[in-house]
Amino acid sequence: MPESIKAEPIDYIFTTFPPVSRAQTIRSSSSTTPLPEPVMSSGNTTVADDALMADMNAHYTPHGSSDGTMEMDDVVLATSTPTVSQGTRSMPQRRQHDRGVGTSSAADIVHNTDALHTLALGSRELIKTIQSLSALNIEATLPSLPKFVVVGDQSAGKSSIIEACCDITLPRSEGTCTRCPFEITTTALTEGTDGAWRCTISLVSAYSYSPFALPQDAFHPWHATQRQITMFAVVTNKSQLEHQLKLAQLAILNPDKDPASFATLRDPSQATMIVGFSPNIIRLEVQAPEQPELSFFDLPGAINVHPDETQQHLVGFIKAVIESYLRDPQTKISLTCGADQDVENCTAFRFIKDSQAIDRCFGVLTKLDLVHISRMKIVERMLNRKDYALPQGSWFVTKQPSQSDLEAGISHEEARNIEHSFFNQPYWQRVVQDFPQQVGIGNLQQAISQIYTGTIRDHLPEIIERVNARYAAITQELAGFAEEPSHPASIVTSEVHKVQFAISVQLDPDGPAKNLYKRTLTKLINFATELHKLQPTIDWQTRGYVQPPFSVDDSSDDDATPSKVVNTPAPKVKGSKGSGSAVTSVGAGRKHQLPTRSTPGPTTARKLFANQTPSQASKSTIAPTAFTLAQIREEYDVSDPDPRATNSSHVTNSLTLTTLRPWTQSTTAALSRIQNDFLTSLTAIVNEILAPRLRTKFYATMQVLLATNAKSLFHKASLAINHALEKEQYRPMLTANTDRWKLLAAPVEAKLSEQRHRKRVEEHFDRVEAHLDASKHSSTELRLKRASEAVWRAANADPYTRYVPHLVKIVTYYGIAASRFADTVTGIVTFELCREFGETVEAVLKKGLKMGDDGACKKLLEEDPGRERMRLRLLEEKSRLEMARAELEKVGGLV
């Protein structure tokens, strides 16, 4: 492969594209430090100055182009970082000393032939960690990592600075300027390698070239796409690196061709380029023994104007690219300026000020051999931080090889010897003595290492927190996805067994507290209580009784104020004609006629669950049947005008059935609550066990099978309960246990008789004491005492006594029937539903899910293709984050 390659000039065929996408989201620094006014030379020199200048010229003759610069784009040095306190400590100040005492010479300059070892001295693990994090491509979690950037104007000597730091050779032939970003990574060789120098070149494509697509963003005609890395070449001979980089750049500039077609091209000058510039990256991974870990981004130098009027858009593009790095608060900056020009005229310096990045910057002066004696004072004042002071640190001075030295192929060691000799000149010896830590490439390397390492250390806590937070979020998100099954039938069988077991626990009478069975039993007990609360009520007021008016004693009234009279109207008699009562149909005017039966048939049974939610049922108002004494008398008198007749059982049966009518609504509400709880519990079981498979057909089918089986059994139970309710509401059924009847009837009779007696006493004494003030009425206890006397009883016989036994039968029967029906419902629900559901669930699921069929089970476990792609992306990101966590754990103790 040729050592030097000629190429046709291609400087004026660049294609415009916007800065990298990350630049659109980088935060601008809010802090800015005002710079002092530049100190310009007056142009007048002293005799001593002239003599010193003559001595300098005698020792060192400047070349036409110093520091190896030429008319071409230079490079920007960078790595990946945040802003820091440790990384922002000031650089060394001028040494104060007396002449002749403790003086330093050029020999005291830090001089290390291993350019990279010095740069990462004592910081290898921190830098290697950032390098590894950057390679993981987790920009969503870490949009920016600690960076170190070298900026400067075109031909300011940045390329020489980078080469001195990395001990590599960049393309320098005419027409081969930097036309795409270069990422240069240095890495120490691992154990087991042959220990030889090597450089791996890869192409990182994050943008596609679409010149005919509609402009959608500032990158047109380049559009962001998924990042891809393509291996291009492995170089083991340093002398061949420059040639391979030219080929890699051609591959980047021809996005429509296979990069492999350029890897073996012998003469790059014979190749054409589709585009003049690309946002895609050429990555260099340099490996050598004891190599420190660093990462550099090589970008164009700053320009104010392009020589080709048709390419003026590149001026704005280059500015945008540079400022995208400068505005990142995690970026530390080294400003490269030629010592022979005024800093205020430096375009890159203006970019730094515009980006409010002065507080993260220090400077490097190049082209020292071109400095006129009149500017030496300015250089010294800059080193002493009196002119153009940079808050991040001091200015440095270095001397890099000239263009003729580079063309001669001098080595890195020879370049350092040239720098050593240059600073041994008389005037520069004084600079070395005053600023020993700001002279030479070795000191610059140490400064970069200190600032960069401090920046990493200060930002490690934030980086660790970001990685851990994203890792936790992805882990939680992945919990909602099902893994791809290797044995579908086994997985389905295993999950079904888990569901069956969970259901059996919920339906176990001896299971945990508040399981489904015990909650159902509680609802059934509440249902029985509700039935007893619907026991009929009786208004014992005598028909036609009107409470007489009585005076209310009010001592605050004037004597002239007549007594206040309160008149309480008698309540309307339910069951009388025109009353509209529900009981009017009970034999009113029709002797011994049973009420029309309104019991639920099969259709009604199905409606016990349909079209009614538990909340609706619970909100329904269910009132017990209310009788009045007048109504009872009318019903029985119509049926049996003769008070001595005893054939009144037909009326009693009719009134008894009337009291059972509210059971239909009460039963419907109770069963709705039970069904809802049952189905909700089944859903909760499936949701918990099949949480990772919520979007699979397996989950949906499982839910349908369980719900369908439960509803089927509920319908079966509702038919049985409806049949029992129909029997209760058809005709009163006498109990065979007469002793129980007597036991229950006795207290009912005593209670009802007492209620009627108290009401009669109240009505009697209200009439007798009507003329008295209300405050002078007898107490209830006194009234009852007087009414217990035989004389009072003989004088006040109750014509309604004959109706009390009938009411005793109605109320007593209601209590027996309510208990009997509640027990029936409880038995049906606990047997037909709870027990039978637990026994049938296995067969239902086995048949419906086709357990044992691998093909059918695989289809059940499949998710939506889009979600599967998302799951795989999350798994890939999780894997990267796990690697990031492992890297961060290695340096966690350095935080």
Image (cartoon, rainbow, N blue to C red):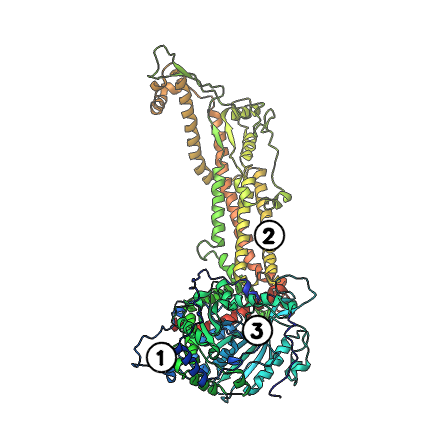
Label 3, on which residue?
Answer: 181
Q: Residue at x 68, y 67 (%)?
A: 211
Tell me the quarter of the picture where residue 408 sits.
bottom right
Q: Position of residue 628 (x, y in %)?
A: 50, 26
Q: Earlier in the sequence, mark 1 or mark 2?
A: 1
Element type where label 1 sits in the image: helix
Q: Position of residue 97 (x, y in %)?
A: 30, 76
Residue 555, above or below 158 = above
| Secondary structure state at the residue bearing disc 3 | loop
For the point 41% across and 16% down, the residue is: 565
How would you rate the neighbour count of disc 2 (Cα within 10 Å): few for under 14, some for 14-19, many for 20 or more? some
Res. 107 image quadrant: bottom left
Rounded to the nearest whole Å, what is the CA distance between mark 1 and mark 3?
39 Å
Decide: marks 1, 3 in contact (CB < 8 A)?
Answer: no
Q: Amino acid at mark 1?
A: Gln
Residue 740 visible in this rendered orientation of the protein: yes
Q: Give the residue drawn at x 38%, y 12%.
A: 562
Q: Amino acid at mark 2?
A: Lys
